[in-house]
Amino acid sequence: MALVENPSRSLIPSFLYASPSSSRGLAAEVSPAAAPSFPASAVEKRRSFVVPSPSEPGRKIEMHSPAYYAACTAGGILSCGLTHTAVTPLDLVKCNMQIDPLKYKSVTSGFGVLLKEQGVRGFFRGWAPTLLGYSAQGACKMGFYEFFKKYYSDIAGPEYASKYKTLIYLAGSASAEVIADVALCPFEAVKVRVQTQPGFARGLSDGFPKFVKSEGALGLYKGIVPLWGRQIPYTMMKFASFETIVELMYKHAIPRPKDECSKSLQLGVSFAGGYVAGVFCALVSHPADNLVSFLNNAKGATVGDAVQKLGLWGLFTRGLPLRIAMIGTLTGAQWGIYDAFKVFVGLPTTGGVAPAAAPAVLAKA
């Protein structure tokens, strides 16, 4: 593998992933005079941000390389696409409770109505747009989050990025979600219409052209602003709270450093941190979720129509308990799958104890 030509370029984001001791080691390598005292193989090993894969000993993925972002993107596809598809029955009941609360009065009665009217197969109506839409969203969300987190850390520099790391998480996740929702929005529009209007279409293959014929191509993005209103606060809470919770767990709840913990324990921390983060996500994004369901169900509907029909209390509470249960489990599973995939390809799990601010020698390098 080629050596890193400019080590100072890698020093800025390295504090997010490496310990202070490893950062000091990297600083020492800046001096060319120190290189002859090490074997060539040792120099290459120390000067490259690489993580060996446990399943493929000869394979290495360099941190923040194209291969690294590709791995994060693939992990996002798996974590978001599979989990959202798995909870399609819950999502179906939730959407119908939001649209027709008189008919779907509770979770239990909602499942009963669906079973009576549509049978068992009806529980997975809309699975195809769910799978494709949230796979595309997950790819952009996870891949671009890792990119923007490093990008904003580079701009801030190690001292300020360490001091204001939560702002880095918030800015990186918000930027990623703006892009991710552009990929999700057309599939979400078709999904809601298929799930809440029986007889509209069987699924994506016939629902997509029928939706475009009825609403026009721009109609697929009719709900983009409410979708941003739902997903951007959701994602900002998802990433910032997860990173913070995981950091606190390693700092206060686990008696040994993260790098000394087993992979199974690290993945357990990822799931637990993700579940708690998911509860917060549901609370901050639920009003916009009600708006998205209402607008995509009714042709020509506006935000004002939704507020008038649902009321402010209804916007914040209708379907909320079910969504808390669904999003908590969903987010925990997403982080578990995402980090499991990263471990599989030889990358570290997300989050951990925040390192100390960069030493002065690094700041001057």
Image (cartoon, helix red, strand yellow):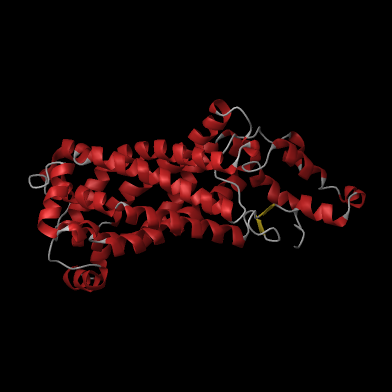
Estimate the x, y position of residue 112 in percent, counting from the top left.
13, 48
Indicate the quadrant where residue 259 lies. Answer: top right
Estimate the x, y position of residue 216 in percent, counting from the top left.
21, 70
Indicate the quadrant where residue 206 lies. Answer: bottom left
Left or right of 317? Residue 274 is right
Numbered-mark total:
0
User: Can residue 135 be seen by looking at this rendering?
Assistant: yes
Estimate the x, y position of residue 83 in percent, counting from the top left.
37, 53
User: Quick one: 93 or 237, which is closer to the camera?
Assistant: 93
User: Quick one: 88 or 115, which is closer to the camera?
Assistant: 115
User: Quick one: 47 or 116, which is closer to the camera?
Assistant: 116
| Quadrant (top left, top right, bottom left, bottom right) of the C terminus | top right
Q: Residue furthest front?
A: 120
Tell me which residue sits at (45%, 51%) in the image.
175
| Quadrant (top left, top right, bottom left, bottom right) of the N terminus | bottom right
Estimate the x, y position of residue 343 in percent, counting from the top left.
58, 51
Tell me which residue sits at (36%, 43%) in the image.
329
Tell me which residue sits at (53%, 54%) in the image.
341
Tell me which residue sits at (22%, 58%) in the image.
192
Q: Is residue 28 above or below residue 296?
A: above
Left or right of 29? Residue 272 is left
